[in-house]
Image (tube, rainbow, N blue to C red):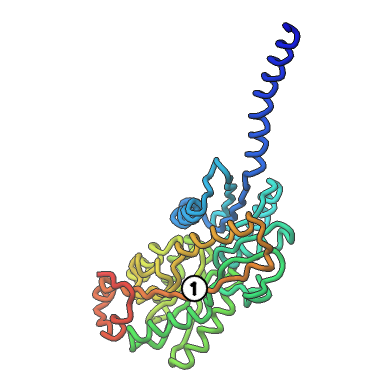
Amino acid sequence: MNLSRSILVVLFGLGVLVCPLAADAQQAADFARIGFLGATSAHGWASRVEAFRLGLRDLGYVEGKNIIIEFRWADEHYDRLPSLAAELLRLKVDLLVTYGTPGSLAAKHATTKIPIVMVHSGDAVVAGIVASLPRPGGNLTGSTYFLPQLMAKRLELLKDAVPRISQVAILVKPDNPFFAPAIRALEVAADRLQIRLQQFEARAPTEFDAAFSVMSKRRVDAVVVLEDAVFVTHAKAIAELALKHRLPAAGFQELAAAGGLIGYGVNFLEMYRRAAVFVDKILRGTKLADIPVEQATKFDLLINLKTARAFSLTIPPPLLLRADQVIE
């Protein structure tokens, strides 16, 4: 009896030990490891990352409980993106999340096997990121919006707000592979509006001041800012320089909020929350071939009346009525 009782005690003790180990093993297997490839910086992209986290939490994913997010940031040096993507892959991530054309192309070139979620891209088809929206092909899906047409619309809105303009600067980041198709769309719109365009390059914030100084010397009437992650991060610096040099500026929504005249574009925070839905589908086993790329359909117009007054501009009432937000 004593021997039998001893065996039972030992077996019970083993069971107590084995069960937690089995549970831990199951929990580890249920963890999803997400690699987040960022072209900018953790600080500059904090609000968007938080929107992504909120989207994940809405779907039941909590960091440290059932997901791990490994972040790698290029700190605005796009040439670092390929090596950072490779570093994330060495961590055996289950999928990659990235944004923008530079990040999406770097991820696409880094792997043909690990699923990739593209939070947004200016035009994923034109940039060669996907074959088509309904059938993206390969191992990548996500969201896109038609940036070339968006840039053309910003020029039109700028002309509506300031009819006198005839010479307009375009601020571009030359190492963003998407700026060429955006420029072509702007040129078509400029011809129709009888506007002459001049390009000015800035690879980093340290080059902003020089670019705007040259704009002033060339006596341009206004500036359109190309969509780029670095420019979005430093929207306030760009808006301040536009004000300093008396140049009405049109660009993304953050630019108008920071002091530019016109902002027109997609709601990026909503796109980051939406990215969590793509992540969820992939983690639940949905085939990438069955997840089409989504196209942004809602665009908001912001007009900064405070900036308009600083330039002694009167915004036409019809344009004000079209605005989704007027900043006083």
In-front residue for pair 235/199: 235
Residue 298 in picture, x, y percent from top left: 44, 74
The residue singled out by tag 1 in the image is 226
Q: Quadrant of residue 241?
A: bottom left
Q: Is residue 277 left or right of residue 51?
A: right
In-front residue for pair 190/27: 27
Residue 292 in picture, x, y percent from top left: 62, 70
Q: Is residue 165 left or right of residue 83?
A: left
The amino acid type of the residue labelled 1 equals Leu
Q: Quadrant of residue 29?
A: top right
Residue 143 in picture, x, y percent from top left: 56, 68
The N terminus lies in which quarter of the figure?
top right
Please tell me whether residue 115 is drawn above or below residue 290 in the rendered image. above
Specify whether residue 96 is in view.
yes
In-front residue for pair 60/194: 60
Q: Residue at x 65, y 60 (%)?
A: 116
